[in-house]
Image (spheres, rainbow, N blue to C red):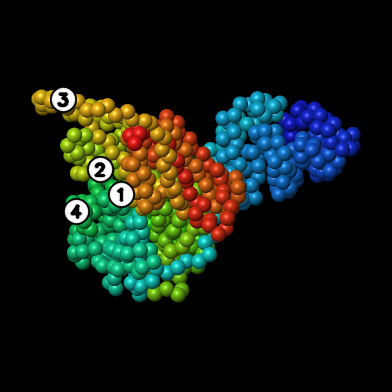
């Protein structure tokens, strides 16, 4: 809370409110007198004396909420953030509608206390409360409105600052790193790993004794098995240096580096190709305006293939190796490379970029920021207002240390990170290490969406079809009629398709929270503008008369239980199959009512469990809707936790109840 000018803002309404409140408490006359003294001390710029007076008022009248409110102001001015937070928390617990602005102030205090998760909670709560009518907050709502408007101008950046600080704190919570072991690591240098969505596949670069680089691929049966590795034969067919690969999350489009590809031009260049049946097909070098006569290497492609990052040494940079970005244009070409600026780049070397699934957080290696060792991993966040990346933050120990760290990678579920390091205790040189994050990073949850555009009658795929989406992005279908989008989870994806041989197509798709081991599938069936029907066959002869059978209606209840992993609202492939089978069994019925009820176990905060149960119920409800199930009434509710330590795994669930009417033979 800024200075005394803010305090003056409260006085016009707090004095009256304080007297009214004091009349209800014990020792009300003394409490009122102490409160008035505190107000005068604040006006005089003496917050320490004011705090003592407000403490006296609250001891005399425990229900004196305005005194608690100004006690928080005084303690914040004194720099006693913990005491200020406690006073504000008391106000909210006693009367959650006493003040809307207090949620913002509490969020800012927790941010200053280096508690970003709580800061984010209260800042988002303040944003959520904007949907409520101002009159619900009484006289305080009107009085606080000017300060609310000022807070709303800063809110977007405040939320982002808390989010990125929370992300960086996740790395501090890492307890240890584990070496991937042999055969991935060896006495040579291994680096720049990239894992498939289900983490059964791995690509990484290995450096040979003579400095040559090879792209290595690995496969494993399950997450507990060791990788079986082999050289990527379709790339490593010459003595050239090849490696440093990245893939679009659809697993089809690959970008990689080839060095010394021309005897007259001893530079590394970035190539792109299609990964088909384990081989790279149709590989081609990126355009000259990107590669040029300079060193270009270590590509990083965004989740959906719309942004390309790479390291390069070229004229006009900040210094050394810098990181650049290209944006996919509507016609499918790349924009001119743009240097990411001094928030990321320094006069020394920056390299090995990696982008989060939502495209907002950049991880990279640097020698020029505030390092713990030779080269550290940093993160920077995209500021949409400024149109640039923020100043980089060191991930800190134990990810970084007094050694070299290169090439950060985050799995598709956001729960496991990987980095190459030459720290002691490895197999030699750079080894690939992994680490588990204590919580999923706070970047926006993303669902991998595979869309298929086909002819509604023949089922034939429609290749090279333009698929525009919001934010100016444009996608194109491949040979199989498939396009791939990284869409925000629990959102609506509006798609409009135009094709000269088909009727216009328009539909809003509900996008659920997804585990992303395999993409969430949507189908876009295009209808021909004119369909020539074959001549109608003559009608069959009428059936012989039969006895009339009177059917009667009966009501049927069908139930389905959907299980969830701990602290997760994502649907697993197994549960998706179960839902699909259930939908198929009731889809054609006359459904009267559907009730989707979410539950959690009894671990953790009750309010958090309510929200988690709601997310689980919503994920199932969205999938039922997308599958085409319809009912006269649909109810989706989160009930929170079920007690019982012995069966917690069974309590992490969603119960689906479907009631429908059908006609049956009375016999």
Residue highlighted by disc 2: 482
- Report the residue at 58% width, 31% height from top: 130
Answer few, some or many: residues within 10 Å of disc 3's Cα (few below 14, many 20 plus, some between 14 and 19): few
- Considering the numbered disc 2 on the image, is that residue within a helix, a strand or a loop? strand
Q: Which of marks 1 and 3 is in front?
A: 3
Residue highlighted by disc 1: 250
Q: Do labels 1 and 2 touch, CB within 8 Å?
A: yes
Answer few, some or many: residues within 10 Å of disc 4's Cα (few below 14, many 20 plus, some between 14 and 19): some
* Label 4 vs 1, first from the N-terminus: 1
Can you give x and y, in whole percent of width and height, for residue 12 in the image? Answer: 76, 27
Residue 281 is labelled as 4
Answer few, some or many: residues within 10 Å of disc 2's Cα (few below 14, many 20 plus, some between 14 and 19): many
* Label 1 vs 2, first from the N-terminus: 1
Q: How far apart in space, not on screen, are marks 2 and 4 (Cα)? A: 18 Å
Q: Is residue 71 left or right of residue 340?
A: right
Q: Using the image as rendered, state which of residue 141 and residue 407 is in the foreground.
A: 141
Q: Do labels 2 and 3 touch, CB within 8 Å?
A: no
* Label 2 vs 4, first from the N-terminus: 4
* Label 1 vs 3, first from the N-terminus: 1
Q: In this view, does 170 lie above or below 519?
A: below
* Label 4 vs 3, first from the N-terminus: 4
The quadrant of the picture occupied by the C terminus is top left
- Considering the numbered disc 3 on the image, is that residue within a helix, a strand or a loop? loop
Residue highlighted by disc 3: 542
Q: How far apart in space, not on screen, are marks 4 and 1 (Cα)? A: 16 Å
Q: Which of marks 2 and 3 is in front?
A: 3
- Report the residue at 33% width, 51% height from top: 518
- Report the residue at 27% width, 27% height from top: 548
- Report the residue at 81% width, 35% height from top: 39
């Amino acid at each position: 809370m800024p200075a005394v000018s803010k305090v003056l803002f409260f006085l016009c309404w707090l004095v009256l409110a304080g007297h009214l409140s004091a009349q209800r408490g014990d020792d009300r006359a003394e409490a009122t007198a102490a409160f008035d003294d505190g107000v005068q001390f604040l006006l005089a710029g003496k917050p320490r004396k004011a705090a003592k007076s407000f403490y006296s008022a609250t001891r005399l009248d425990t229900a004196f909420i305005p005194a608690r409110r100004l006690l928080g102001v005084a303690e914040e001015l004194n720099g006693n953030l913990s005491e200020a937070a406690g006073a504000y928390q008391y106000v909210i617990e006693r009367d959650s509608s006493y003040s809307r602005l207090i949620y913002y102030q509490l969020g800012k205090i927790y941010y200053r206390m280096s508690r970003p998760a709580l800061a984010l909670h209260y800042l988002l709560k303040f944003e959520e409360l904007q949907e409520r009518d101002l009159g619900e907050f009484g006289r305080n709502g009107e009085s606080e409105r000017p300060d609310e408007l000022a807070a709303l101008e800063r809110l977007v950046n405040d939320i982002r600052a808390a989010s990125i600080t929370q992300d960086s704190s996740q790395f501090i919570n890492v307890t240890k790193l584990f070496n991937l072991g042999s055969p991935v690591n060896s006495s040579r240098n291994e680096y720049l790993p990239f894992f498939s969505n289900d983490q059964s596949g791995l690509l990484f670069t290995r450096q040979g004794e003579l400095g040559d680089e090879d792209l290595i691929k690995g496969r494993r049966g399950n997450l507990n098995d060791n990788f079986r590795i082999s050289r990527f034969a379709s790339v490593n067919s010459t003595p050239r240096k090849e490696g440093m690969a990245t893939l679009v999350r659809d697993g089809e489009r690959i970008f990689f580096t080839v060095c010394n590809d021309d005897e007259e031009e001893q530079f590394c260049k970035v190539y792109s190709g299609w990964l088909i049946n384990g081989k790279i097909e149709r590989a081609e070098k990126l355009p000259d305006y990107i590669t040029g006569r300079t060193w270009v290497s270590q590509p990083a492609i965004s989740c959906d293939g719309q942004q390309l990052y790479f390291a390069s040494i070229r004229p006009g940079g900040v210094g050394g190796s810098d990181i650049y970005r290209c944006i996919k244009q509507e016609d499918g070409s790349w924009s001119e490379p743009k240097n990411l600026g001094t928030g990321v780049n320094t006069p020394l070397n920056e390299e090995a970029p990696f982008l989060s699934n939502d495209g907002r957080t950049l991880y990279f290696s640097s020698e020029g920021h505030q390092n713990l060792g030779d080269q550290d991993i940093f993160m920077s966040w995209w500021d949409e207002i400024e149109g640039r990346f923020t100043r980089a933050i060191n991930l800190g120990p134990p990810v970084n240390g007094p050694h070299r760290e290169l090439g950060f990678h985050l799995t598709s579920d956001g729960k496991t990170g990987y980095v190459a390091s030459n720290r002691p205790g490895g197999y030699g040189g750079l080894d690939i290490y992994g680490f588990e994050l204590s919580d999923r990073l706070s970047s926006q949850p993303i669902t991998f969406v595979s869309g298929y555009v086909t002819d509604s009658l023949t089922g034939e795929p429609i290749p090279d079809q333009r698929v525009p989406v919001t934010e100016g992005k444009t996608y194109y279908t491949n040979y199989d009629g498939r396009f791939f989008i990284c869409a925000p989870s629990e959102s609506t994806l509006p798609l409009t398709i135009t094709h000269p041989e088909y009727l216009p197509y328009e539909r809003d798709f509900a996008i659920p929270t997804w585990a992303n081991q395999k993409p969430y599938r949507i189908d876009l069936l295009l209808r021909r503008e004119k369909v020539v029907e074959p001549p109608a066959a003559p009608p069959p002869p009428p059936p012989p008369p039969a006895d009339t059978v009177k059917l009667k209606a009966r009501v049927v209840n069908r139930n389905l239980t959907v299980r969830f992993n701990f602290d997760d609202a994502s649907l697993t492939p197994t549960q998706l199959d179960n839902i699909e089978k259930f939908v198929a069994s009731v889809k054609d019925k006359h459904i009267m009512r559907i009730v989707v009820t979410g539950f959690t176990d009894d671990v953790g905060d009750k309010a958090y469990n309510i929200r988690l149960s709601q997310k689980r119920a919503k994920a199932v409800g969205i999938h039922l809707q997308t599958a085409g199930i319809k009912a006269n009434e649909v109810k989706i509710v989160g009930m929170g936790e079920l007690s019982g330590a012995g069966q917690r795994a069974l309590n992490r669930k969603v119960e689906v109840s479907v009631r429908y009417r059908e006609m049956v033979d009375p016999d």
